Image: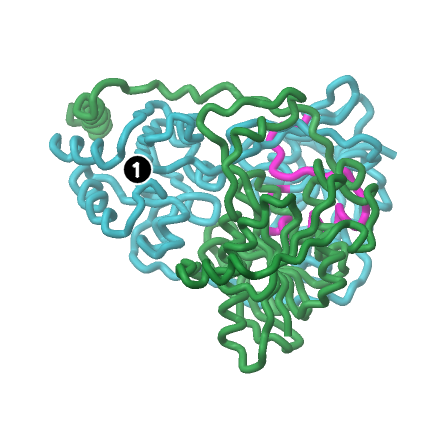
Chain colours: A cyan, B green
Amino acid sequence: MGGILVIAEQRRGELRPVSLELITAAQGFRAAGDAVAVALLAADPARLVDPLKVAGVDEIITVQTAATEFDPDVFEAAVGALISARNPSVVLIAHSIDSFGYAAALAARQGFGFATDVFKVERIDGELVATRGGYGQKVCVEVDFPGRSTVLLAVRATVFKAPDGAGSPAVTSFAAPSVVSRAESGDFIEASAADDVDMTAAEFILTIGRGVGEEAKIAQFRELADVIGATLGCSRPIADAGWLPKSRQVGQSGKTASACQLYIAMGVSGAIQHLAGMKHVSTIIAVNSDAGASIFGVAKYGIVGDIFEIAEELRRHF
Amino acid sequence: MKILVAVKQVAALDEDFVIGADGRDVDAEFLIRDLNEWDDFSLEEAVRIKEAAADPVEVVVVSIGPEEADEVLRKCLAKGADRAMRIWDEAVAGSDPIAIARILAAVARQEAPDMLLAGVQSSDHGFASTGIATAGFLGWPHGAVVASLAYTPGEKSAVFRRELEGGLLHQVKIQCPAVLTIQAGINTPRYASLRSIKQAAAKPIEVRTLADMGMSAHEVGEQGSLSHVRRMYIPDKGHAQLIEGSAAEQAKRLAGIIRAFKGEA
């Protein structure tokens, strides 16, 4: 049958923004006659239909699920059944924590073409080609899917923009198969805030990363942040080691620097999960001893050098 | 009781790396190999479960890779794994994570562990697919991005918290045996002592071929993969404007940018 199927993502009754980004991603490679259908899996999908009525969507398919929240068995069965029924040539899903929980199992069992963390999708001579990063994003890798009639692509968030303009898609429903899940959803828990900092509100952030090397060096940067008037943030390894509280972690599993205008990253390599929380900041300054660090790819200004030396010299000016 | 831990020898790039002649991967000469960071956390989690259990628990590590992967398996033995297995065959070269998962599923069927742990993703290619695809082939319950875990080997279920975007946690109870992918930061991995490194060097690594696993060549490598690498290339380098000069000069410029931002300049 062909066409493109987009799997929207919701959590606790809210549509996640990546759902709209997937719709934009679909426009980039749709062939003439390719319909774009967006499937919405939720306990009460009708509630979330309106925000998906955007330009580029031909059909919204509501799939009522027995589970209120994400459940790997329920989602795998529902998406699998929908793909069997519609037989799309391409299925777009978010590269997200939820999709980590079932997309690979679905692709493996059904033999779909499959690639994750895709940031570019195109057709080259009619062939579907997806591009992803490799070796810590230092290279780009183009993959294709010879002989696969259905290809499942997990697309990176914040690469595509939400579509402009409204649409008037048809709204249909699909009956999900009933499955007995082997997982039981419990509570949602906010990671405990060890201090009351709000990274999402900070306008000026000084972030430190793995390059700091040892806990004893944290104090130097804490003092520097205070003196220059910045909020001290960190990348994942620093929070994982317990050197700074999780509430100061910027990135996909931490906080997004939503209000930030000046972001100084010291000793941060620029893992894709970190960039997700800060790459939008208008002025990013990266200080790193590795000239090849990915952080320089999103920074406005770069200093290739020793972070301790730069920190010490910078301190003299305040 | 048994916990199977899947580990990968990952590769980081040497500073001046080049793409190999076929244009599909980095020239192997420029790869620096080590144990995947996430796998260090999943091994530690398995060893802690073993240490806390009243009944004997065996921690078995398995890696799919050529002989050089023995290095990471010895590291795992030194950090508390009881046994190490390595599966390899020339036909496995070129496998994507799904083909690797098919082999891991065969290992799990032979070893019949009570729980299978894998890292959320690998630090080199970040597919975040291998563990959950293995669960798919096995038909086992599975959970991804586990940031805390309460599990006693032999129990019929485990309770874990998966780490969602924004740091939100979601508690899930899952039936066992299951496949769980472990998030970095779930614990603090131990360092191997000199004594345990020495002991690990003397331990055997069980090497198996595809035939030993009852598998054939077409199930692995490019034929057994769900994607095919067309081309690998080095993207245009970042557009950061470099601030040159001595550290003092660089810091002075940086101070100027900060002052301008704060409206002090």
Where is residue B10? Give x, y as percent. Answer: 55, 42
* Residue A177 within the segment the image draws in magenta: no
Where is residue A125? Give x, y as percent. Answer: 77, 17
Mark 1 neighbour class, 10 Å CA radius: few under 14, some 14 to 19, many 20 or more: some
Reply above or below: A170 against A304. below
Q: In the image, what residue occupies the spot 50% across and 54% down?
A: B75
Q: The disc numbered 1 marks a residue on which chain?
A: A
Of residues B142 and A289, which is closer to you in this image? A289
Q: Is residue A188 left or right of residue B65?
A: left
Q: Is residue A232 left or right of residue B149?
A: left
Reply above or below: B32 against B188. above
Q: In the image, what residue occupies the spot 43% across and 35% down?
A: A270
Residue on which the image places disc 1 = A203
Q: Quadrant of the C terminus of chain A?
A: top left
Of residues A98 and A61, which is closer to you in this image? A98
Q: Quadrant of the N terminus of chain A?
A: top right
Can residue B142 be spotted in the picture? yes
**Quadrant location of residue B28?**
top right
* Residue A101 within the segment the image draws in magenta: yes
Q: Which residues are magenta?
A: A94-121
In the current view of this chain or complex, which residue is farthest to the front?
Answer: B202
Where is residue A144? Give x, y as percent. Answer: 73, 29
